[in-house]
Image (cartoon, rainbow, N blue to C red):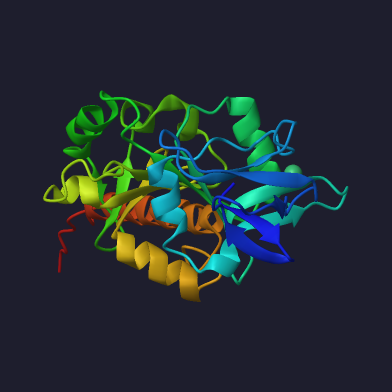
Amino acid sequence: MKYALVNDTPKEAQPGLSGKCKCCGSPTIPKCGELKIWHWAHSGKRMCDPWWENETEWHRAWKGKFPTEWQEIIHTAANDEKHIADVKTGQSYVIEFQHSRLDPQERIARETFYQNMVWVVDGTRLKKDYPRFLEVRKNFSPIYKPGFFLVHFPEECFPAAWVESSVEVVFDFQGNPPTDPQDGMRDTLWCLLPGRAKRGAVVIAISRQTFITTLSKQPRLLPDPAHEFVNALDKLFADQEKLREQQTQNQGWKPRKRTWRL
Ligand SMILES: [Zn+2]
């Protein structure tokens, strides 16, 4: 963990400090070695939150872009189940940063637990993921407004474990340290929305800064919950299709020529 409570105040790990876990209250010790990023660990026992994963530079860099008081927040469900959210914004939107592969069952469990959340996935973990994305990116169809796309085969574009997610999944292909800061495609965040419109997936291109400032001000990434937005787009496409069909039929219908005899 990045933070533990030292005299009831969240503090980062430093040699000589001792703290308490924000989640379970157990004693924690600072781990300030050279190999792993400095962090707090439970003394003598395993991490209390089974969903916790060891943090990378990438994790820390992302978390650090949000206010300290939003980082590592304990989220408690109605049944008293507790987990540590990487970031929970002032408007209770949870941001989970995921570097490692995630078992689909655990992905579903976390989405069910947090509900109002977005994943940010490290797209640099597997070398093949970015070239594969770039290849499919060529066929993205622009829709709705600039930066919005329809993708017919999202499983060919993004790692399979994320394609059926019930919440927004943001892919970060830049990594940390940055793989190639000059590469605009890498530097853009690609957000896959849940659900389907016109049998395709909706993907939004968004800048890092927009992502951060939006979540600092708005309750969530989009003005409406993402699945509602995708459903509305699907309805819009269906209505447009119907209208086109009607127009085609109308064009096809020609009044019979009448010859009037006087
Ligand atoms: Zn704990």
Q: Residue furthest right?
A: 79
| Picture residue at 57% right of the left edge, 42% below the top | 166
Residue 251 picture quarter: bottom left
Give the quarter the ligand 1 occupies.
top right
Query: Which residue is more in the foreground, 221 or 215?
Result: 215
Q: Look at the image and tell me whether residue 207 can be seen.
A: yes
**Residue 140 drawn at (x, y percent):** 23, 42
**Residue 234 drawn at (x, y percent):** 45, 51
Query: Which residue is more in the foreground, 119 or 202?
Result: 119
Q: Is residue 224 left or right of residue 62?
A: right
Q: Is residue 46 left or right of residue 242?
A: right
**Residue 52 drawn at (x, y percent):** 62, 38
Q: Is residue 170 left or right of residue 69?
A: left
Q: Residue furthest front?
A: 16
Q: Residue furthest bottom?
A: 217
Task: Name the quadrant of the C terminus.
Answer: bottom left
Residue 123 picture quarter: top left
Q: In the rendered view, would you say 107 is above or below 92?
A: above
**Residue 113 drawn at (x, y percent):** 71, 45
Query: Which residue is more in the foreground, 252 or 221?
Result: 221
Q: In the rendered view, would you say 26 is above or below 5?
A: above
| Picture residue at 54% right of the left edge, 66% below the top | 68
| Picture residue at 26% right of the left edge, 50% below the top | 248
Count of numbered circles on the image = 0
Q: In the rendered view, would you say 101 is above or below 258?
A: above
Query: Which residue is more in the foreground, 154 or 5?
Result: 5
| Picture residue at 54% right of the left edge, 28% below the top | 102
Q: Look at the image and tell me whether residue 93 can be seen.
A: no
